[in-house]
Image (tube, rainbow, N blue to C red):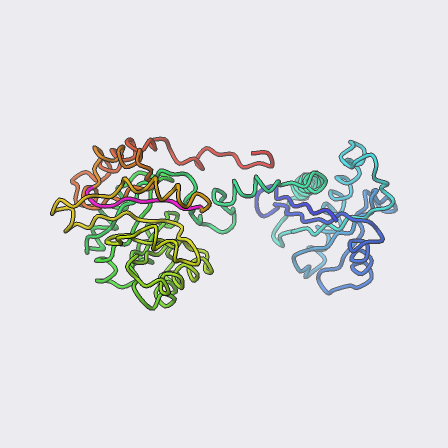
Amino acid sequence: MLIGEALLGTAPELAHVDLLIGSKDGPVGKAFAQGLTTLSAGHTPLLAVIRPNLPPKPHTLIVPKVTVQNMEQAAKIFGPAQYAVAKAVADAAEEGIFPKDINLDDIVIIASIFIHPEAKDFRKLYNYNYGATKLALKRALTNYPTLEKVIYDKDRARHPIMGFKVPRLWRPPYLQIALDITSINRIKEMIIKEIPKSDRLILEAGTPLIKKYGVRVLRELREVAPDMFIIADLKTLDVSKVEVDLAYEETADAVVCAGLATTESINKFIYEAKRLGIYAIVDLMNVDDIIGKLKTLDGFPDVLIFHRGIDTEEAGGKSRWELIKEIKQEFSDKKFLVAVAGGIRPGNTKDALEKGADIVIVGRYITQARDVEKSVRDFLKTIGAEEPAVDHYRVHSEDG
């Protein structure tokens, strides 16, 4: 059994085709026969035909995805869509898209098609469904996509209908802006709206901000930064599941646990975050034996923070950045990023990156700056991220 999918065109005539290719005596053949003999109101399957009495080879069954409610809608299925699918299959056979060692009389195709009830232009319906069917066939017969492509694209892709992007951390280094000030109006109007657009930026709802407004402040940030990666710095010490769930419900992409929490609490924290599909971050501030603590864990955090607190920084405390490469070497079989926080300036950012940091966390240098945009650009330049977000120019295709 082979599986193919393709989306082409623009609404309301856009075409989305899902198809199965398989032998007549296999599961696809059985589904073909059942579909043709078991009718469902509004979703009546029909054979693809180039014209009445001329089906293509392989025989193809069309299954409408959207409920057909009247004869006007039925005409779109039994007209341009039926012809487009049949013609695409016939042309694919002529052009050698099917392997030569396959007997086309031994296989069948099931094509599930989307026709919008408001579609009106029959020529567009034909063009889009023809192209989508042919592309889906080619993809099925070449086992597209490869696993490598799926892994590469899964955190970069934007779904065209969803309306927003779910950001992931796939392209370090990053600049994380710690929103530790307690004025939500200043944050929304004078910081977030001033920062340049870049896929190398992370927003952190700092602990003081969350303590003042509660985790609901995450939704307020999301309203003005819908596509940005947003972290809830809860510094969880106990009741891990409850706190992860709170952050998740308010749309956080990641949540922070204190490394000083018990092993049991951190294990529950990591488990719950990964279960929900958000990042588990552990803040290592004041953890003496970092490697020892990490070895006690059942799972592994997505991000580790080497955090020199403000009070420690002002007292001249050391950063411990020299441990980053040691930890990365010790846990080389794990996939994780390392962030550094505390006294970060453009002047010492390069040193942090050279010591192995993937994320630099900056608070007051940006949030209290007179020119927020310039301050952010200073850091982006330092981490080598001045160029526009990659998705602004990226062309998504079957090969790209």
Q: Does residue 277 appear left or right of residue 71 in this picture?
A: left
Say above or below: 396 vs 119: above
Q: Please state the horizontal and vertical placement of residue 364, each as a whole percent of the image.
A: 18, 45
Q: Does the magenta stretch include residue 337?
A: yes
Residue drawn at point x = 33 percent, y = 45 percent: 202
Q: Does residue 155 appear left or right of residue 149 in this picture?
A: left
Q: Please state the horizontal and vertical placement of residue 107, each as a whole percent of the image.
A: 83, 46
Residue drawn at point x = 24 percent, y = 43 percent: 320
Q: How many labels does the image show?
A: 0
Q: Of 156 and 92, which appears nearest the observer?
A: 156
Locate residue 121: give its quadrant: top right
Q: Does residue 324 appear left or right of residue 27 in this picture?
A: left
Extreme residue toward the left, this view: 315
Residue drawn at point x = 88 percent, y = 46 percent: 53
Is any part of residue 62 visible from this angle?
yes
Q: Please state the horizontal and vertical placement of residue 190, each as a whole percent of the image.
A: 22, 46
Say above or below: 38 vs 253: below
Q: Please state the horizontal and vertical placement of residue 205, each as a whole percent of the image.
A: 28, 54
Q: In which quarter of the image is the C terminus?
A: top right
Locate residue 389: give its quadrant: top left
Range shown magenta: 335-343
Q: Of 48 and 93, which appears nearest the observer?
A: 93
Residue drawn at point x = 67 percent, y = 60 percent: 67
Q: Is residue 297 magenta?
A: no
